[in-house]
Amino acid sequence: MKKILILLFPVMLLTACVDSLDDYNVDEKKASTVPAVTLFSNALKNYTDALTTPNVNNNNFRLYMQQWTTTTYLDEPRYNMTARTIPLNIWSSLYKDVLSDLNASKTIINANVILTPKVKANQLAQVEIMEVMAWSVLVNTFGNVPYSEALNPENSLPKYDDAKTIYDDLLNRLAAAIGKIDTSAGGFGEGDLFYGGNMTKWSMFGNSLMLKMAMVIADSDAAKAKSLIAAAAPKAFTSNSDNAAFPYIASPPNNNPVSTNLNKLFTSRQDFIPTSVIIDNMNSLNDPRRSAFFTMINGEYKGGNYGFTNTYSAFSHISDNIIDPTQEGLVLDYSEVSFLRAEAIERGFITGDAAAEYAKGVTASINYWGKSDEMAASYLAQPGVAYATAGTNYKEKIGKQLWLALYNRGWDSWLNWRRLDYPQIKAPVVTGLDLKLPVRMIYPHTEPSLNGDNFTDAATAIGGDLATTKLWWDKQ
């Protein structure tokens, strides 16, 4: 009897310390609450993943821009958006994995009474800049999308807002966010996986994003674009050290998603090769970036036939550094900003030397890929590259070099191609098919059944849910 009482006594002590047995049902390996910084960091990664991955189920923009092609599967380089759930996957990535996390992070920050006002303002500005960037990708990919009623779990049928109205609001939100940054105070600190808490860099990032987003509307609202660009351009990136990039590491799930799909450490698939379209262009200009972009085959750079089957072993491959698990994921860089400044000068939005900014853009790209200033100068001296002789107009000159500089950033390349209409790439000619390069992504196949009335209204408003329907700013 004494032994029984001795055994029961500790149990009584333990149970007396809890209100119910539910208190034992706690998974100590999972957080019961999530801090704002964790959600923010996760959103940075998920955004970069969505724009960086070459997975054919998620992101085919390198294919659309004929920078890469496939060896076997032809639906994607022939612009089929229904054979896989491609629109749904990028839609879900941005809404569920990026915007939802950012929205939750913002809610937690606003409720935090411990944060100093300046740090709170900076954190909210960082979240806002990323929200604007993610929303801009959705709007510039699909057109009208759920916005004002989105991210509300109590509303399963959000209306689609007008794309131009959304975009105007995003520009206002971005300007307000930039204005709230106090570079003397901190932000998310080490949880800021782009800049490690450097708010001066975030201010430059915000202004660079403003420059980019304002240039999108240059043909549809030149006056507004000019005003925004004049304010943002002087405060945007000034060197490659300012680039916004995610620092991938060697091990999954935080390795660069390009490596997941191409590196033999993670896959045996041989789905992608560079195209003859881009390699022939770079060969003709003796481009020093070729060794950073491609491998050689039989002593030469040789690209595959876009839109048709290709034997993997017969052509150049994507370079080892691009498929490296630790290759950083570029989100926005100095090279693109320099080209945008050159374009802004040509349009009369700002003053300056367009040729000099163009040369900075070319040089920044060449330097980023590990090549010297001397190589850049030699490249720029060629008639086919020199600003004075490279093309018949500034859109052709800038458009081609942007396409090359954005070789590993397919979505951004697609955005700039739609704006500038250069380079003048053509759809593959296939018997029995009338192929046209897509200028928008069709809506997810689930929308007609899940949100039918609002989907129908949106499709009608933009002129049809087609890959050939131009977005409101695409005037050329």
Image: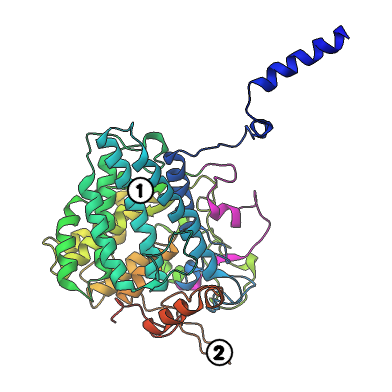
Q: Residue at x 33, y 66 (%)?
A: 401
Q: Where is 141 relative to 207, above or below?
A: below
Which is nearer the eye, 195 or 403? Answer: 195
Q: Is residue 337 left or right of residue 445?
A: left
Q: Quadrant of residue 377?
A: bottom left
Q: Residue furthest front?
A: 1
Q: Quadrant of residue 140?
A: bottom left
Image coordinates for residue 141, horizontal then vertical, percent: 41, 70
Q: Which mark is residue 433?
A: 2
Q: Which mark is residue 270?
A: none
Q: Residue at x 50, y 66 (%)?
A: 156
Is residue 267 one of those drawn in magenta? Answer: yes
Front tag of 2 and 1: 1
Image coordinates for residue 406, horizontal then vertical, percent: 39, 61
| Element under disc 1 | helix
Q: Is residue 163 left or right of residue 312?
A: left
Q: Residue at x 51, y 68 (%)?
A: 60
**What distance separates the C-alpha of mark 2 from that of mark 1?**
44 Å
The boundaries of the magenta stretch are 249-277
- Main SS category, magenta section: loop
- The residue at which mark 1 appears reads as 127
Amino acid type indicated by mark 2: Leu
Which is nearer the eye, 285 or 443? Answer: 443
Quadrant location, the C terminus = bottom left
The image's colouring method is rainbow
Is residue 208 one of those drawn in magenta? Answer: no
